[in-house]
Amino acid sequence: MSWPPLRLVIADDQALVRTGFGMILAADGIEVTAEAADGAEAVAAVRRTRPDVVLMDIRMPRMDGIEATRRILAGEGPHTTRVIILTTYDLDHYVYAALTAGASGFLLKDVTPEHLVAAVRLVQSGDALLAPTITRRLIERFATREESEPATLHRDLSDLTPRELEVLRLLATGLSNAELADRLFLSPTTVKTHVGRILSKLDLRDRVQAVVLAYETGLISPGGRDGGT
């Protein structure tokens, strides 16, 4: 299969991680345009090289990966850069904050070479990097905010049709497109169309942000309970 060109920045404060990931990706024809040892370097590298994807560690000196992700995505022009968060824990308490900052998903640092390459190409294609089971675990763990923390997302869902609201509710429980199609007795193509319209109407980057928004707006509550309309 012929893949489109892919340019990538690796941001991690461990040189061995940067080197190892860079070798794996380069062997598959992915161009590593720059490496960064902290968040500030990552922001500068993205502005300088305009990559398609950034592999972003969370815990780094000077500027952490969350702030770097926020700055990178806030400063986007016509070129879309997508961020994949790197973490050593599958439920790192920083991950939810990174997703709300606009990251397209996350990977564990012990990811296999094959999964690393597939994940980077998946995100480049515009999809989100959260397996359904991880979506459920992550969002249920982190979607609830402390009462003292102000809500950061108030989005009007009234533009969505009843069917689109139904798709969004199920999507937020971690169902894949294939599972949505089975549940709703629709074709995968129709489901993909519904998901695309939801993202467009709500001005969302990908399905990760759609999942986050469903919880933030109370459309669904942790545990998969319908929050009502």
Image (cartoon, rainbow, N blue to C red):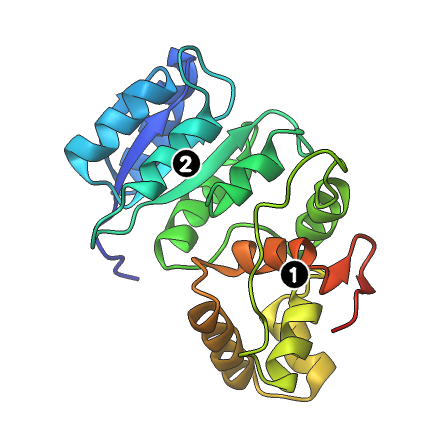
Find residue 203 and report its image quarter.
bottom left
Q: Is residue 51 above or below residue 196?
A: above
Find residue 205 and report its image quarter.
bottom left
- Residue 135 horizontal/vertical position (percent): 67, 51
- Residue 149 horizontal/vertical position (percent): 68, 35
Crowd tier of the residue under label 2, counting other residues whose Cα lies within 10 Å: few below 14, some 14–19, many 20 or above: some
Q: Residue at x 47, y 81 (%)?
A: 193
The amino acid type found where label 2 is placed reads: Arg
59 horizontally vs 147: left or right: left
70 horizontally vs 156: left or right: left
Q: Relative to the observer, which residue lies in front, 224 or 190?
A: 224
Find residue 210 and report its image quarter.
bottom right
Q: Which residue is mark 1?
A: 214
Which quadrant holds the N terminus? bottom left
Nearer the N terminus, badge 2 or badge 1? 2
Q: Are marks 2 and 1 in contact (CB under 8 Å)?
A: no
Crowd tier of the residue under label 1, counting other residues whose Cα lies within 10 Å: few below 14, some 14–19, many 20 or above: many
The circle drawn on residue 147 is none
> Which residue occupies the extreme left position in the image?
48
Q: Which residue is mark 2?
A: 70
The amino acid type found where label 1 is placed reads: Ala
Q: Is residue 31 above or below residue 156?
A: above
Q: Residue at x 68, y 72 (%)?
A: 179
Query: Can residue 42 be seen at all in this image of the molecule?
Result: yes
- Residue 5 horizontal/vertical position (percent): 21, 51
Q: Residue at x 79, y 71 (%)?
A: 228
Task: Give the secondary structure at mark 2.
Answer: helix
Task: Give the secondary structure at mark 1.
Answer: helix
Which quadrant holds the C terminus? bottom right
- Residue 99 horizontal/vertical position (percent): 54, 43
